[in-house]
Image (cartoon, helix red, strand yellow):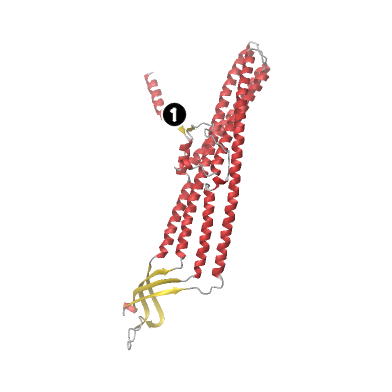
Amino acid sequence: MKRTICFLSLIFILMSPLTGMAQKSLSLEEAIRLALKHHPSIKAQKDALKASRFAKKATSANRWLKANLILQAERHNDPVTITSIKGPGQFPPFSRDIYFWQVEATFPLYEGGRVAQEVKIKDLEINIRQSLLRQSTEDLIANVKQLYFQVLYLKNLAKAQRELYRLLEKQYRDASLKYQVGKIAKLDLLYFKRALEEEKALLLASENNLRLAKKLLALVIGLEDTSFEVSSALEPSKKLDFNPFSADKFLDQRPDVKAAKLKVKQAEAAISRAKREYLPTLSAFSSYGRRAGAGLNNDEEVWVAGVRLNWSIFDSGVKRNLVKEKQALWLAAKEELESLRLAASQEIISAVSRINSAKSQVNRLKAAEEFAREAYKREAFRYQAGAGSINDLLQAQEAWLRTKSNLLKAYYDLNTATISFELATGQIAKEFLNE
């Protein structure tokens, strides 16, 4: 007996951590922070942003000195001079084999503002990448919120169905006892049995959908298992008032609109960069090295220094058409910005309409659910007292369940509409980015 008690105690101790893990609570904020930490889309945007910063540094480096080391060995069909003539009357050495090394250096003195415009373009690219990172963050937060509230809705729906199933079980047991003593007909008992089986099927479907939704949520936030319980309330706590309402004040807060504006500025900078091709470039250059012939004989130093002006005076229209191309891309960027602003305004207005509709639905169903619950209690009391029929009781039960399910769905619709509004107005990530 003592061994049995010890064995059971050991099992209880070992199972306690597992039980704690199974009941681990996961808040909405925790789920979002896990997703922001682990999701590959955020990591990809951060890496792209890092690459843009390195690209800007590489472009800025074009303003400064550059040096190259050259090592070369060559063989000619006829002997050539190893070095240039050193002075009058001196005959230079010849060789078919030439070996030399040299260091070449160039320093830009004037480049017509080309590098400055390229740096500006890269700087705008960094800002665009930051906006795209913000957009990916907002999309991910919206996705997590949608899945989280879906899990919460299915959890509450399954809970309500489970409570009703237990109530029907009790009623079925009571009806079975009444049938055994001849107080009700067998048909009434079969009605209870049918209602019980139908409710069981609905409960199983909701539980299966809940497990699937939890798996999807765990996948998005980077958890390997679904042994967690969502802990937030399904009924929204945030009260939104849209009187008066204007979509325009929210447009500039959207990261995609910010990115589109930056692309217009980037296209303007690209036009300016293309026009710089009409200007010359001026650079200082020098090189130092040594040359030798066959067997490394006649080794001599060679060096050169100077200034070079490079000015393209005719290119068959290359520069002109390049400028026209950039101007056309600038016009396209402006039209894309206007198109995006129009689509964003439609999203915001649609989200506000959905919120108002969902709020009206919630208010209506709250009253309907309370009435249906009281009607069910009244019919249950009448049936227990022998004054009501089984059909009236089951109809009241079905109406209550349907109204309660519709109320939970209305809460879920209100939450998703609020998420759509926060996403459409660029406000969904503020509390998670310390803004």
Q: Nearer the viewer, residue 409 or 425?
A: 425
- The vertical placement of 155 against 427, above or below, is above
| Residue drawn where x is 34% and y is 74% of the image | 289
Measured as percent of width and height from the top left, residue 39 is found at: 48, 44
Question: From the image, which quarter does the N terminus lie in?
Answer: top left
| Residue drawn where x is 49% and y is 50% of the image | 131
Question: From the image, which quarter does the C terminus lie in?
Answer: top left
Measured as percent of width and height from the top left, residue 100 is found at: 35, 75
Measured as percent of width and height from the top left, residue 246 is found at: 58, 43
Instruction: Please identify the residue farthest to the bottom as the structure is shown.
Output: 89
Q: Is residue 91 left or right of residue 432?
A: left
Q: Secondary structure at mark 1?
A: helix
Q: Is residue 324 left or right of residue 229?
A: right
Residue at label 1?
A: 19
Q: Is residue 308 visible?
A: yes
- The vertical placement of 401 against 382, above or below, is below
Measured as percent of width and height from the top left, residue 366 is found at: 59, 27
Q: Nearer the viewer, residue 104 or 213?
A: 104
- The vertical placement of 300 against 185, above or below, is below
Q: Amino acid at mark 1?
A: Thr
- The vertical placement of 52 against 114, above or below, is above
Disc 1 crowd, CA 10 A, few/some/many (<14, 14-19, 20+): few
Quarter of the rendering containing residue 82:
bottom left
